[in-house]
Image (cartoon, helix red, strand yellow):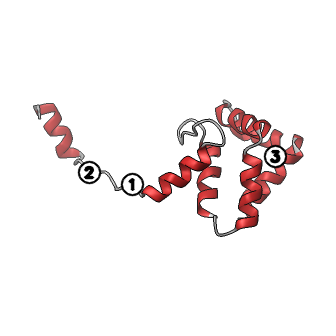
Amino acid sequence: CSLTCFKKHKEIPCLKPEPVDESEVLKQNQLLSIGKYVSKNVYPVLFFVVKRICLIDSVAASSEEIRDAVKNEKLQTLICSIDSSADPETELERAMEGDESFRLFTQKVICL
């Protein structure tokens, strides 16, 4: 390391990356194949939904309904527009008031 690099490592030590659970990655990849690649940084709401679906596989009926809903391109577009909005809270409120299918979808996700 250079002196600058050494000082940086001294302040913030390097950490070994956590091991990746391959079964979790496979589940997420299967869910992500329903639409575009979902990045935690780009689409946090959709990432949350996909992650939530991964965690609720034991609730078969509800998760099937949610999986089917997430396949809907209109819903994907709406979620992406909320995520990319300068004011996502306002966009979310508009979507909840103006789109019955989105409101029902969010209620299903929240209830799980």
Report x, y in % for residue 68: 76, 51
N-terminal-most mark, 3 or 2:
2
Left of 90 or right of it: where is 2?
Answer: left
Specify few, some or many for label 2: CA neighbours under 10 Å numbering under 14, 14-19, or 20 or more: few
- Cα separation between marks 1 and 2: 15 Å
Assign a secondary structure to mark 2: loop
Q: Which residue is drawn at 76% across and 36% down?
A: 73
Q: What residue is rendered at 60% in x and 38% in y?
A: 43
Of residues 1 and 72, which is closer to you in this image? Answer: 72
Instruction: Say which of marks 3 and 1 sits in front.
Output: 1
Per the model, the C-alpha gap separating discs 3 and 2 is 41 Å
Element at badge 3?
helix
- Mark toward the start of the polypeptide (1 vs 2): 2
- Name the N-terminal-most of marks 3 and 1: 1
Q: What residue type is labelled 1?
A: Val
Q: Which residue is drawn at 15% across and 32% down?
A: 4
Q: Where is residue 45 in the image (x, y as percent from the top left)?
A: 64, 45
Which mark, residue 102? 3
Circle 2 is placed at which residue position? 15
Q: What residue type is labelled 2?
A: Leu
Residue ID for mark 1? 20
Binning the other alpha carbons within 10 Å of mark 1 as few (below 14), some (14 to 19) or many (20 upward) gives few
